[in-house]
Image (cartoon, grey):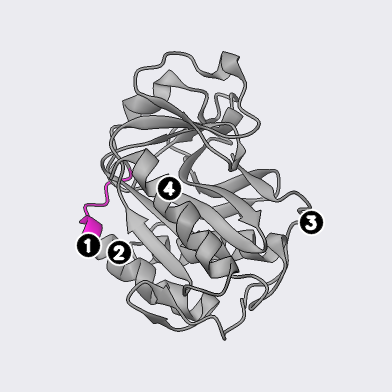
Amino acid sequence: MAYEAALAAMTARADAIARGQAGELVWLLEHPALYTAGTSARPAELIEARFPVHATGRGGQFTYHGPGQRVGYVMLDLKRRAPDVRRFVATIEAWIIGALAAFNVRGERRDDRVGVWVRRPDKGEGFEDKIAAIGIRVRQWVTLHGFALNVEPDLSHFSGIVPCGVADPRYGVTSLADLGVTVSMPEVDMVLRGTFAPLFGATIDDQIDGSTENNSPDRRNLSSSAVPSR
């Protein structure tokens, strides 16, 4: 789906949720190849604009979206759940980690790096690759944006940016396909739906029951309304 159209639809839906005129929504989709620039993006981190670059209201630096990547826009009303941004981000991480476990991939969180990471001892001691980026914004206690899980994207497309501002050569990007896991996007979606409910509450398709509170443990002390994708 075109990024501009998705952004407009997400923003309109979040505004309607805040006004009490629409239900919460988790929206799973796929974008054409593009880069997005978060509120902390630095021009020097755009190495080569191989694809269109879109400014976005989420926190963080540059990231890539494209075919083979499952993007999840999570529009939840934290006033009705738990008005805690730290807890919300930790829950998204736990959600993705649980989904990866269904494919026998061990995803891990890091206190100093938002997102979900996979250890890569085959590349050397201390090497890790990011398999899922997380970047959100909270407006009127309604969440916008969400996560990007690499299923089978062209990883060379990340070379046009410093992904999420992480320049350390020990930290790269990976995907399920890169790790030798062959899985279809519908299979990924099925697992995401199944692992969502125990953490966030019951769902009907992608609609969320707002009466169920977020069950994740606390983790980071995040005060900003725009959480970086790093």
> Which numbered disc flags the more N-terminal residue, 2 or 4?
4
Q: Element type at marker 4?
A: helix
Q: Earlier in the sequence, mark 4 or mark 1?
A: 4
- Identified by mark 4, the residue type is Ala
Main SS of the magenta part reads loop
Question: How far apart are labels 4 and 3 at the CA level?
Answer: 30 Å
Q: Nearer the viewer, mark 4 or mark 1?
A: 4
Check the picture and name the quadrant holding the C terminus.
top right
Q: CA distance from mark 3 to mark 2?
A: 30 Å
The residue positioned 54% from the left and 55% from the top of the image is 144
Q: Front-most of 100 and 121?
A: 100
Residue 25's image quarter?
Answer: bottom left
Q: Give the amino acid at mark 3.
A: Asn
Q: Give the residue number, with chain letter if any, for mark 1.
A: 186
Q: Which residue occupies 53% across, 35% down?
A: 127
Residue on which disc 2 sits: 189
Q: Are marks 2 and 1 in contact (CB under 8 Å)?
A: yes
User: Magenta segment range?
Assistant: 179-186
Residue ID for mark 3 = 221
Q: Give neighbour class at mark 1: few <14, some 14-19, many 20+ (Cα, 10 Å).
A: few
Which sits earlier in the primary sequence, circle 1 or circle 3?
1
Q: CA distance from mark 2 to mark 1?
A: 5 Å
37 and 104: which is toward the camera: 37
In the drawing, what numbered circle is on residue 8? 4
In terms of secondary structure, where does tag 1 sit? helix
Horizontal arrangement in the rendering, residue 228 relative to residue 124 (left or right): right
Q: Earlier in the sequence, mark 4 or mark 3?
A: 4
- Disc 3 crowd rating (10 Å Cα; few below 14, some 14-19, many 20+) is few
